[in-house]
Image: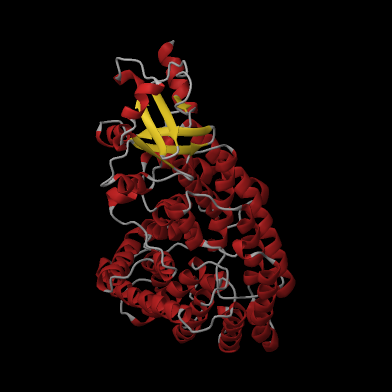
Amino acid sequence: MYQADNLIQRLLSRRPGSLLPLVLLGVLTGIIASLVMMSFLFLLNTTLGGLNGQNLEDFESLAWYWQLGLPLVGSLLLILLYRLTPPASWSVGLAYVVERLQFGQGRIPAANIGFQFMAALIALGSGHSVGREGPTVHLGAGIASQVGQLTGRPPSQLRLLLGCGTAAAISAAFNTPLAGVLFAMEVVLMEYSLLGFAPIIAAAITASALTGALLGEHAVLAPVSLSLASHLDIPGLLLTGLGIGLLAALFQWLVLTFVRLPLQSRAIRLLLAGAITGALALVAPQILGSGYDTINAALGNQLPWLMLLGILGAKLLATAAAIGLGVPGGQIAPTLMLGVCAGGVAGALIPGASDPALYALLGMAAMMSAVLHAPLAAIATVLELSLSAESMLPAMVVVLGANLLCQHGFNLPSLVITQLRVRGQELQTHPLRTALAQRYLSELADMSLVEWSGEGPLPRTDAAALVVKREQGYYLIELSRFEQEVTPETLDELLIPERRLLPLERDMSLLEALRTLQGEAGAGFLVPVRRGRGLVTRARLMHMLTEEGGLY
């Protein structure tokens, strides 16, 4: 009976090792994220349908003045939205989610979620060369963060819930649950953990199932069946991957070029992005919007390679301008389109027995992987979007070549990390420091303490820790270590620097705590928690870091 009660308490607790509440919160996140994403897609599709008819992304059929002016109108609407919204709500997108996860304890304000919803509708509805994935991730992660904050989850569990929200939103928007799980692990959390898989999978399948039940099949790409005709084509595939790796490096360089343009005004930057996109659309209208109709055409061998090359050049410049100049949209769909165009050109020019459309399909995975450093998520995306399992082996070859050149040849980080570095934020990459930065003192806090001013009689308590408050600070008296009674008369002798406590106004990661204690003689920290204030001693911190099973 005792073992059963202990198991139930562990499953339902707020401790980092507790699985059941995280799975339940993952399911709840999946439900809410699915409903929000269906609302977003309904409004977006209604807007695109009003412009382009039944073929939602058929910007090619619009008159030239619409192709030129639509992105400019979108930029003007975005400028108005920025003017009407407080600056604290302006930060959006995938990079912002990673920033809040790494530096903000996983807390995403509700106002940013609303701003992202409206900004993405305007950017995508007006044909800017961005994707819906970045906004999708922000919406899902923001919902998960709000759920976690309302239920009082500690920072490490908020972090995991952001992964649940990411997977749920991608799964709901694109009907790709496996890619959603891997994307959350590789790009957002930047780690794989056994504890994380269960709640993230629960969120992804819940969102996919609910969206499928309410909307039916809603895949953005038409299924294709493509396979490698001969293993003699593998050298050509590797060459294709290397070429796409070079393209990914050029894409990052162009994004940084636009980011560093000496234009301080957000309005001017957005108008410039709209003007560049509109001008390029006069030459290649296929660049407008996410471009899934063009991707489907390329996968069906409906576009000659010279046209694909022209679309590739225009899309490369338009997307780099949109992302670098601050249009609030995602980068995955544009990278997929860049990859499919580059792959299609390679398939037409490189000798081999395989269908050129196979090269186009694999180019999507290679470009996404090279830009975001997400090889498994890229391969899973191609697998689920195309429903073509035969493409797995050649996809791994092309992804390998692209990642080798971009990640190791040019030593480039992912685009998300690059965007954060531009803002002056450097992510932890060392495995040990990363693990310590992801756990917080509040998770170790002992609530069984008594505070005493040092005046009057000692409080009667069974607590082992007595916190004495004096003008010069807080001190820890561990009553179990003293045989004689602690009195106001003997107290001053005990208040030595080694027993001093550091009161914190906010929670602190274990990495920050160790750095704070380095070279200091203090006894530990007083940490703000939901029920007041908790105690984390130096000895408890060292025990949790060094004893087996301590840092669960």
Q: Residue at x 41, y 32 (%)?
A: 535
Comparing 351 with 177, the one in front is: 177
Instruction: Please say if 394 is above or below 515.
Output: below
Q: Which percent across, then down, holds residue 193? A: 36, 43
Instruction: Name the image quarter holding residue 29.
Output: top right
**Mark count:** 0
Residue that sits furthest to the right in the current view: 50
Residue 414: image x %, image y %?
38, 66
User: Which of these two is toward me, 353 or 201?
Assistant: 201
Q: Is residue 302 visible?
A: no
Which quadrant: the N terminus? top left
Query: Relative to 63, does residue 259 appear above or below in the rendering?
Result: above
Nearer to me, 95 or 491 = 491
Query: Furthest-top residue in view?
Result: 1
* Rendered image quadrant of residue 520: top left
In-front residue for pair 365/279? 279
Residue 154 in the image: state x and y as whole percent. Answer: 48, 39
Assign the C terminus to one quadrant of the image. top left
Colour mode of the rendering: secondary structure
Residue 40 seen in the figure: yes
In-image side of 515 versus 82 (left or right): left
- Left or right of 187? Residue 38 is right
Q: Is residue 524 left or right of residue 266?
A: left
Percent across and percent down for residue 87 are 62, 65
What residue is at 35 percent from the left and 29 percent from the top? Answer: 492
